[in-house]
Amino acid sequence: RGVGQEPTGALLRAVSLRQVTLRAGAELDAHQVNQYALTLRAACPGEEEVEERLFVQVTAGQVLRCDAPFTSTGRRWGVAGAGWRGPRVPAGTGVPRLCCAAGGDVVRVSADVVPRTPLYVVLPQPLGGLTVSGGCPKFRLRNQDTPLTLTHRGLVLAPASGFNPSKNTQRFRLEIEVMDRHGHNCSGAVTVEVLPSQRPSVTFREPQWAVTVPEGTSPLEVVTQVHASGDNVRYAILAPTVPVLFTIDEVTGEIRSTRRLDVAHARLLVQAYNTLNPADHATAMINITVQEVDRRAPSCVPAISVSQVPETVSPGTTLVTLRCTDPTGAKDCLHYGLEGPPASLSRFRMEGPQLQVNTTLDYDSEAMAAVGFQFTATITVTAGGQSPRSTRVPVLVTVTPVNEFTPACPNGPDFTVLETAAFGSAVGRVAGSDRDYPPDSLEYSLEGGTGPTQPFSIDTRTGDIRVVGPLDSQRYKRYRLMVRLTDTRNDLDPAKRWSRLCDVVVRLQAVPNQAPVCTPEVQELWIMARLGSRQPVTRLACQGSLDGAALAYAITGGNEDGRFWLEGNTLFYLSNDLAEPRTFVLLVEVWGSPGAPHRSTVVALVVHVTPWTTPVPPSTTTWHTTLQKELLVITRTEAAWLPPAWFVTVLTVSSALLLAALGCVARSLLCR
């Protein structure tokens, strides 16, 4: 035993031969007690007691301190050194809180803390403005019966494999010694209490289940999917250790085939675990059966559907009803669908085994014409089960036209024509319309036909009206025509046609009655051509209406090479290298009121031109000979049909064959 001189009691105790230790919890203060005198007595059995004195001097210096919570029951050695404190836990480690207890600091953590998470740290603590001496300290764990780890920086880490997810509280005590380079040290204790995790553990809803898949399943096709509750769940296949037929996605839990499956049976042991705490895991057994399937598809009647419907068919009308059977004998397991272009899918639908019209089928539209008035689609009949089997029934629907609308007359079909219009002159065009497809497919006809009271004709295809007879302006100032519009090719039945009568007015435009009078109307002239000179030939003497309006003159015939031209009523000849005498017959038209409808007179001029080098009578006088007026013949050309050559040939051959047949018949009758 030791005896001290400190008023508060002995500070040292003898624990073994020649070893003296500082009492636990004792603190040395040189300013209060700087020397201790210890009396040591030792005795062995059967021997006399020996007494010795030991003097311990305490000098002032920096003390290596540890915080009270850390060292509340710990021991200290040394008389000099810097202070150290604990605990301090880094932010974000998930440690709920720290508290003091009789056995040192206590750290409470959850059992699901991430492996190797820092739980406690011993950090430098300045004391009295002093700093740590001796450089970086060393930390040593005095007890090794703990799964926790102490690093060289004084960090207490969670186990590398995490804590055991027990339902009871687990406690781990760590006795830590801190020593600087000079040997100054302090020690303390930390107790880590591992509380049961409040988070849900990794669990499967069912420990095992069975899955059936059809044979022929393609590689990497999803067979089934496992799901476990918990945090940070990952999945793995434990058995078989080398999966041959299946693989699992560690994140989603989807189990996929690795190759095309044949009939087989497999047992998979699947583990779900917390990736941050692998000790938190659960397993499940999955029995996968690859079943043989019947590959026969359903049979349907009819196998092909071809239908024809009018454009006025009502939505909801059934076009075809399929009668399908499943070879496996299953009932009410057939599913019907429709595939095809968007135009078909929008106009038709499936109601069970019935193909029905979904919307109106308007034949008179550009969209209908774009698809050729036909719709194609495919009805898919699928038998359910693990391996769906389907049959495809092609469908063709043709929409036929219906003559729904009556032709419409144009607005204001009034025309004006000169009262002197010649045969074949165009009057105007009647442009009717029809909303049925094809658009404006009309035929035109005149009610009452063509005659003196209606000297017009109309083109049955274009609606053009032309003059085909004399216009009697004395009796009629206008003609009123009744034009019939009849639609064509607008209905499947050619006899179903609609027509409408349109009132067309043709007005006659008057032309001045008096034509110019020329004296004479026919002249024969002789001139001698002088090279390079312009020679006057004659001056026409014509008189127009009584109001004295100016007359217009134009050469309308006989001046093909341009040797003559008119200036007013004077005719000139342009001399050139004419080698021999030549005669020209010119036609000059004379009319009044230029630019307006008019009557005209034609003057005929016969001009004999003799070259200068040709001997001629000595006189250069131009002779004017008035010819006797002859009857002017006007030829009117009427339109006629000229058949092509092939038509004439066919008609000739047909006639010959007909005559031969009639001859044979007559001969047979005579022979009888």
Image (cartoon, grey):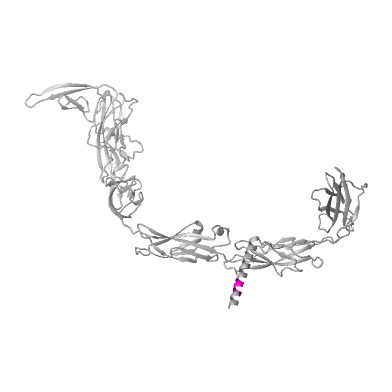
The residue sitting at the front extreme is 671
Q: Kindly identify the residue that appears in the image at 56 percent across and 59 percent down.
A: 369
Nearer to the camera, 588 or 143? 588
Q: Is residue 460 left or right of residue 18?
A: right
Work out which residue is located at the far left of the displayed protein and give it.
46
Q: Main secondary structure of the magenta part?
A: helix
Of residues 297 and 534, which is closer to you in this image?
A: 534
Residue 229 higher or lower than 384, as above or below:
above
Taking depth in this image into account, of 10 and 176 the one nearest to the observer is 176
**x%, y% of residue 291?**
31, 56
Residue 118 vertical position relative to residue 597 in the rendered view, above or below: above
**Quadrant holding the C terminus:** bottom right
Q: State left or right for residue 535 relative to residue 76.
A: right
Q: Residue 495, image x and y in percent?
A: 60, 69
Instruction: Classify 512 as above or below 191.
Output: below
Residue sticking out furthest to the bottom: 672
Residue 373: horizontal and vertical position, in percent? 54, 61
Identify which residue is drawn at 7% across, 27% down.
45
- Quick one: which residue is furthest to the right in this view? 619
Q: Is residue 664 magenta?
A: yes
> Residue at image x 10%, y 24%?
49
| Quadrant of the frame with the N terminus | top left
Span colored in magenta: 661-666
Residue 358 visible, this orientation: no
* Residue 670 visible at all: yes
